[in-house]
């Protein structure tokens, strides 16, 4: 039986609740997260157990800085004292686990947690995706203009049509990702005002975004082959 498993998980970066619940289900099936990579997550075989996970975000962290800051070290010490073990880090995200039956929550101020996630997203996520979306729209406009200028030639060319479709689908995927985060942030901020935490509500939206992106990649592949 394989002792390790690599899996291309497709979670939205800000969906900490969804990630934690997924990892708890994996631990119950005997797979513990070891490391998050650019394309795959690595799991190690272990005895099935009830494990609690918590996902936090630290704006000062960076994938280009291999050493934790003093503030991070203090935060890790606090988590260890509360019974939480650091599993892995991914950029500004940290994942902790504990086998305590009733663990002390790492974060108790929900409004502060939402503000931190939003700060991280403003730094890491939104600028790059907004730029990508603008570039895709510009490129799609160029292709559509070319088709309109010579419709007979371009409409009979499968490669041109497939590339246009790929650009449109990729742009739609990025738009869904951006709009999805905006919806999540507004809902999470409103829920935090009551002192509660927004549950994992991203599953269907995540599936839709991944499906659109996959169709875009297929369109690119068929365009290359044609």
Image (cartoon, grey):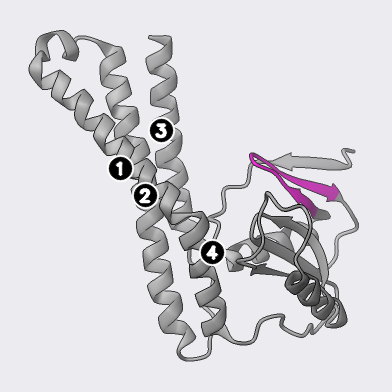
Residue 90 x %, y % = 68, 54
Task: Of the two numbered discs 3 and 1 on the same chain, state the one appearing first in sequence.
Answer: 1
Mark 1 = which residue?
134
Q: Dot 3: few (<14), some (14–19), or many (≥20) neighbours within 10 Å?
A: some
- Pointers 3 and 1 in contact (C-beta within 8 Å): no
- Distance in Å between CA atoms under marks 2 and 3: 21 Å
The answer to whether residue 142 is magenta is no
- Distance in Å between CA atoms under marks 3 and 1: 20 Å
Q: What element does badge 1 sit on?
A: helix
Q: Which quarter of the figure has residue 181?
A: bottom left
Mark 3 = which residue?
215
- The magenta segment: 33-44
- Distance in Å between CA atoms under marks 4 and 1: 21 Å
**Majority secondary structure of the magenta segment?**
strand
- Pointers 1 and 2 in contact (C-beta within 8 Å): yes
Residue 53 to residue 11: above or below: below
Q: Report the mark closest to the observer, 3 or 1.
A: 1
Residue 130 is tagged as 2
- Distance in Å between CA atoms under marks 4 and 2: 15 Å
């Amino acid at each position: 039986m394989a002792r390790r498993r690599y899996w291309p998980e497709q979670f939205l970066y800000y969906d900490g609740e969804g990630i934690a619940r997924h990892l708890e289900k994996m631990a119950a099936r005997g797979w513990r997260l070891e490391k998050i990579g650019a394309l795959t997550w690595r799991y190690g075989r272990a005895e099935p157990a009830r494990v609690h996970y918590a996902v936090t975000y630290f704006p000062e962290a960076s994938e280009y800085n291999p050493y934790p800051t003093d503030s991070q070290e203090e935060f890790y010490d606090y988590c260890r004292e509360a019974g939480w073990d650091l599993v892995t880090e991914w950029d500004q995200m940290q994942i902790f686990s504990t086998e305590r039956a009733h663990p002390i929550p790492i974060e108790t101020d929900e409004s502060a947690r939402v503000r931190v996630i939003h700060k991280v997203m403003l730094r890491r996520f939104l600028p790059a995706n907004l730029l990508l979306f603008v570039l895709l729209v510009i490129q799609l406009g160029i292709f559509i203009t070319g088709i309109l200028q010579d419709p007979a030639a371009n409409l009979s060319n499968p490669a041109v049509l497939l590339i246009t479709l790929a650009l449109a689908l990729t742009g739609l995927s990025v738009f869904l990702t951006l709009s999805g985060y905006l919806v999540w942030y507004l809902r999470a901020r409103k829920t935090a005002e009551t002192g509660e935490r927004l549950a994992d509500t991203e599953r269907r939206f995540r599936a839709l975004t991944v499906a659109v992106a996959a169709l875009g990649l297929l369109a690119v592949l068929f365009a290359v082959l044609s």
